[in-house]
Image (cartoon, rainbow, N blue to C red):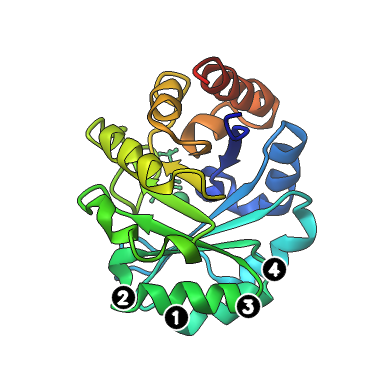
Amino acid sequence: MPRPIIIAPSILSADFAALGAEVRAIEEAGADWVHYDVMDGHFVPNLTIGPGVAAALRPHVTTKLDAHLMISPADPYLEDFAKAGCDTITVHAEAGPHLHRSLQHIRKLGKRAGVAINPGTSPEVVDYVLDLADLILVMTVNPGFGGQAFIPETLSKIAAIRARVGKRDIDIEVDGGITPETAPLVVRAGANALVAGSYVFKGGPAAYAANIGAIREAATAAL
Ligand code: DX5
Ligand code: ZN
């Protein structure tokens, strides 16, 4: 039985002046998780939001808050994101020297632990942390901005991660350039959780259900 498809809209493309309403709108439109992008202007060349906004948003989220930390170092902030109510906390393998320790820490905080890897990073970085990971996020663009084009070379890496994960209870998430055209490719390669920002939010709230539905339909047809 393949894992169910998860669609996780990235609120990076939402209206930041109305985040609570945006989250309610994407959940009503069928989102499975809410993907929360944290950027520090150091690990990635952009700045976004931190644990304070996550805490403010949490009461509006009825699904799961999926935090993607594009920050270095991440360790000093893990507790803050846990207290803010993030359900999954994902750190980048490239963001610090102690990936194993970071994942142990997230698990100890009672949260699902995720590892993200950039397009230029090899899949074997996850080999010795598989027993500590609940999610592996294969970046399908270079992190930092929404609206970038999908990098096709990442498909073979998704497959390599899928082979490594085997029957373990680990989600394989992809993030960047996901549309109804790229969704079947990543699902066939082995991904089950699909983050999408610009595609989901285009057209405003009236279009969210159709946008999420189009990605889900294309992804499910590839199972
Ligand atoms: C990129 C972020 C993504 C981004 C995806 O660094 O991690 O979550 O918002 O946006 P799209 O779907 O527009 O590529
Ligand atoms: Zn992200």
**Which of the numbered marks, if any, corresponds to residue 109?**
3
Going from N to C along the chain, the mark reached first, 2 or 3, is 2
Going from N to C along the chain, the mark reached first, 4 or 1, is 1
Q: Position of residue 9 (x, y in %)?
A: 57, 41
Outermost residue, bottom direction? 76
The answer to whether residue 94 is visible is yes
Q: Residues within 10 Å of mark 2 (few under 14, many from 20)?
A: some
Going from N to C along the chain, the mark reached first, 4 or 2, is 4
Q: Which residue is mark 4?
A: 85
In the image, is residue 219 above or below residue 63? above
C-alpha span from label 4 to label 1: 17 Å
Image marks 1 and 2: residues in contact by CB distance under 8 Å: yes
Secondary structure state at the residue bearing disc 1: helix
C-alpha span from label 4 to label 2: 23 Å
C-alpha span from label 2 to label 3: 19 Å
Residue at 57%, 20% (x, y): give it.
220
Q: Which residue is mark 2?
A: 96
